[in-house]
């Protein structure tokens, strides 16, 4: 792709995100989301592969539908209450339509079908944008309207997302699809707590983005798209593979690593809100995710000699690991000890 075109699309992405997260009026928020959608489409379809074109088409149709629902929800609210302010969403039908629109934008169950397909058709760097930056504006709208939304509906959607993200990731061999289902499961954790402690949802999103960025950039560096190619990458970059192992375990939420922090805080808050059964169910469902992260981690580092693989070994490269990956992997694994500074524990 032409560097100037890439620069324009990147600036448009940042602009769309900034407009949505800083707006008070529904029309401005909608305009920002539309700019975002239009800016990412060329980045998804830049390889001109039929799968990439298909992914871009699916993405466009789903996002256009979600934006229409969002506009419809805000217009219904304005019709009944005379309010265009984002925080003044009070009409029950508007709240229901908005929940559907944002769930569709994010890829929450039952509107999750498009996300794995789109991520599979996009390059790894664009996949990273889809899994992190493109989720930020809808999460912000969720944050601003969280007091108006139905907690029971959100809890049901969250538990279903955690269940489906775990179950459907078990049988995958394509790394991008595994990461897509992992994203759906993480969104379940963010959604279950948004009615009770919206700041905790944002903290979970930031930490999830950090860990996902580290994973995607490491995979992009070693050019791995399938589990079979991941099995042979230990010869190429042994140290990066070791860090990828830790980042994957952090994404799974294992205790000494950063990824445990949001899960711990969410379980604590749910218990305080007398929702111990929901906390128990979602904790058990995260074990499904742990299984496929362990599978990825096993393929990354533990298939060393004398274990035999029927694939060509890759040449060892002396190319230094990019400093961004080094910083991200460090943050993805070592932030737990300073958790009281990140989120004061009450």
Image (spheres, rainbow, N blue to C red):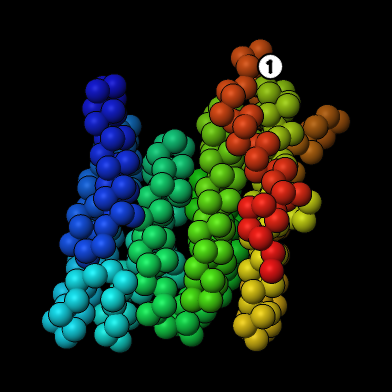
284 to the left or right of 41: right
Residue at image location 31% in from the left, 47% down from the top = 18
Q: Is residue 230 visible?
A: yes
Between 285 and 147, the one nearer to me in the picture: 147
Instruction: Identify the secondary structure beneath mark 1.
Output: loop
Residue farthest to the right, as pictured: 306
Quadrant in the picture for the N terminus = top left
Q: Residues within 10 Å of mark 1 (few under 14, many from 20)?
A: few
Whole-percent x, y for residue 118 in the image = 38, 50
Between 51 and 74, the one nearer to me in the picture: 74
Q: Is residue 289 visible?
A: no
Residue 325's quadrant in the figure? top right
Whole-percent x, y for residue 213 in the image = 53, 41
Residue 273's quadrant in the figure? bottom right
Between 260 and 337, the one nearer to me in the picture: 337
Q: How many marks?
A: 1
The vertical placement of 265 against 131, above or below, is: below
Quadrant in the picture for the C terminus = bottom right
Residue at image location 73% in from the left, 26% down from the top = 238
288 to the left or right of 93: right
The vertical placement of 111 against 339, above or below, is: below
Whole-percent x, y for residue 330 in the image = 68, 36
Residue labelled with disc 1: 316
Residue at image location 75% in from the left, 55% down from the top = 254
Whole-percent x, y for residue 205 in the image = 52, 56
The vertical placement of 248 against 161, above or below, is: above
311 to the left or right of 72: right
Residue at image location 19% in from the left, 71% down from the top = 84
Between 110 and 157, the one nearer to me in the picture: 157
């Amino acid at each position: 792709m032409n560097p100037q075109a890439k620069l324009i699309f990147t600036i448009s992405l940042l602009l769309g995100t900034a407009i949505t997260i800083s707006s008070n009026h529904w029309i401005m928020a909608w305009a920002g989301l539309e700019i975002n959608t239009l800016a990412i489409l060329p980045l998804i379809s830049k390889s001109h592969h039929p799968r990439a074109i298909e992914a871009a088409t699916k993405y466009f149709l789903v996002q256009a539908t979600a934006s229409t629902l969002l506009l419809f929800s805000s217009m219904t609210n304005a019709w009944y209450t005379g309010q265009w302010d984002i925080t003044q969403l009070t009409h029950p039908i508007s709240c229901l339509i908005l929940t559907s629109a944002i769930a569709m934008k994010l890829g929450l169950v039952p509107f999750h079908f498009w996300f794995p397909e789109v991520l599979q058709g996009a390059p790894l760097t664009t996949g990273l944008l889809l899994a992190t930056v493109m989720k930020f504006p809808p999460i912000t709208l969720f944050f601003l309207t969280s007091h108006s939304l139905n907690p029971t509906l959100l809890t049901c959607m969250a538990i279903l997302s955690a269940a489906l993200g775990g179950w459907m990731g078990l049988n995958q061999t394509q790394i991008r699809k595994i990461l897509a289902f992992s994203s759906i499961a993480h969104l379940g954790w963010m959604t279950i707590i948004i009615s009770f402690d919206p700041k905790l949802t944002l903290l979970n999103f930031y930490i999830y983005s950090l860990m996902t960025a580290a994973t995607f950039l490491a995979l992009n560096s070693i050019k791995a798209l399938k589990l079979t190619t991941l099995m042979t990458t230990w010869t190429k970059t042994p140290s990066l593979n070791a860090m990828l192992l830790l980042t994957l375990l952090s994404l799974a939420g294992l205790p000494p690593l950063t990824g445990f922090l949001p899960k711990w805080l969410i379980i604590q808050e749910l218990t305080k809100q007398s929702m111990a059964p929901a906390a128990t169910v979602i904790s058990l469902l995260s074990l499904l995710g742990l299984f496929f992260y362990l599978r990825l981690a096993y393929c990354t580092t533990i298939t060393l000699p004398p274990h035999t693989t029927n694939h060509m070994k890759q040449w060892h490269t002396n190319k230094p690991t990019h400093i961004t990956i080094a910083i991200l992997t460090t943050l993805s694994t070592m932030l737990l000890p300073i958790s009281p500074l990140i989120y004061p524990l009450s």
